[in-house]
Amino acid sequence: MKVFVTGANGFLGQHLVKSLLEKNFQVIATGKDVSRLLFNDKNYAYFSLDITNEKAVENMLSDEKPDIVIHTAAMTRVDDCEQNQNECFKINVLGTSFVVRSAEKYARHFIHISTDFVFDGEKGNYKEDDPLGYVNWYGFTKIEAEQLVKSSVIPWSIARTCLVYGNALYGTRSNIISWTKSKLEKKEKIKVVDDQVRTPTYVGDLAQGITAILEKKATGIFHISGREILTPYIMSMRTADFFSLDKNLIERVNASNFSEPAKRPPKTGFVIDKAVKELGFDPISFDEGLKLMF
Ligand SMILES: NC(=O)c1ccc[n+]([C@@H]2O[C@H](COP(=O)([O-])OP(=O)(O)OC[C@H]3O[C@@H](n4cnc5c(N)ncnc54)[C@H](OP(=O)(O)O)[C@@H]3O)[C@@H](O)[C@H]2O)c1
């Protein structure tokens, strides 16, 4: 089976391509940049593709005619999205429309990756059918992208995920755990919010959850995250504990102490019962994730 992946150079994309190759799928990996991936597998090919180039997207999908398209590409840095709204809309909404419209013609299943930021964060512990809302431009564009997918004529799935952590396979990418570890090792003080709630997701679990959607041809929306409900402050404290680093360097603060360009939804986090029941999804604990990272 041939799987076409957008955003393959990205944090999730790298792990997803690895997971698909391990299951012997043929993978057409695409990213905007030149390849940062070093997979050496007869089932693997990489092409540069800018998803905002409608003609290029159409040409590549008509050439490849994959069975499945997995769309992970997006502008993902929330503050950048707030400050460059046109570019963010172009990539996250227009780009998605080009990929999904071509997938309707040349593929048989479309899997879209979305986010907990499609919720406004007032309620927390979200189920798949909870009402959507947004507090920043990134969230707005991801809701718009979901609407495009939901109104498409190809069988579709949406995998929403939440605060993904782990190591990039190629290159580096900072996340709350690597950031905490590196700051505390240098004996630097950090301020971490304790009034936001998430269900952090180990990147390998997310890749496996998406692979399960594909294997089971499961359609509809799935919440794919860890089980534990944690604040960033607790995540930093647990990271310090794990590495026996000085917890006194971590200052507990509220989001109102920070002036960031984009607001963050206060309480997100997912109920994952549907993914557990229908996909056999079984995420590891946060402490197990820490162990796997280092
Ligand atoms: N990481 C998280 O905590 C998190 C949480 C919730 C949801 N998500 C969702 O998960 C998905 C993957 O996120 P990620 O963490 O892997 O992000 P990432 O590391 O920033 O990767 C995104 C990829 O999108 C590609 N891209 C950007 N503009 C493009 C364009 N015009 N054409 C083609 N490709 C383009 C980039 O490709 P190049 O590198 O080649 O330029 C980049 O590698 C996204 O849809 C995101 O919204 C992530």
Image: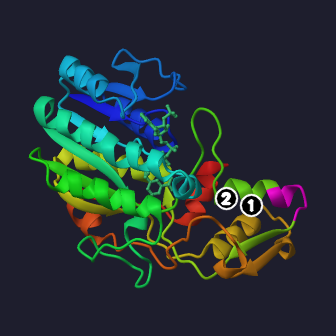
Q: Position of residue 96 (x, y in %)?
A: 30, 43
**Which secondary structure, mark 2?**
helix
10 Å crowding of disc 2: few (<14), some (14-19), many (20+): many
Up-down relation of residue 24 to residue 123 (above or below) = above
Q: Is residue 53 left or right of residue 247?
A: left
Could you tell me if residue 21 is visible in this image?
Answer: yes
Residue located at (75% from left, 69% from top): 241
Q: Residue 240 magenta-drawn?
A: no
Q: Is residue 263 left or right of residue 194?
A: left
In the depicted view, which residue is nearer to us: 87 or 142? 87
- Find disc 2 in the rendering and name its residue: 177
Rounded to the nearest whole Å, what is the CA distance between mark 1 and mark 2? 5 Å
Residue 262 location, quadrant: bottom right
**Which secondary structure, mark 1?**
helix
Up-down relation of residue 186 to residue 133 (above or below) = above
Q: Is mark 2 within 8 Å of ligand 1?
A: no
- Find disc 1 in the rendering and name its residue: 180
Amino acid at dot 1: Thr
Q: Position of residue 224 (x, y in %)?
A: 36, 60
Residue 120 location, quadrant: bottom left
Up-down relation of residue 178 to residue 46 (above or below) = below
Q: Which residues are magenta?
A: 183-188
In the depicted view, which residue is nearer to us: 188 or 265? 265
Up-down relation of residue 215 to residue 52 (above or below) = below
Q: Are marks 1 and 2 in contact (CB under 8 Å)?
A: yes
Q: Is residue 294 left or right of residue 100?
A: right
Residue located at (65% from left, 67% from top): 260
Q: Position of residue 178 (x, y in %)?
A: 70, 53
Amino acid at dot 2: Ile
Could you tell me if residue 160 is visible in this image?
Answer: no
Furthest toward the front, the residue is: 86
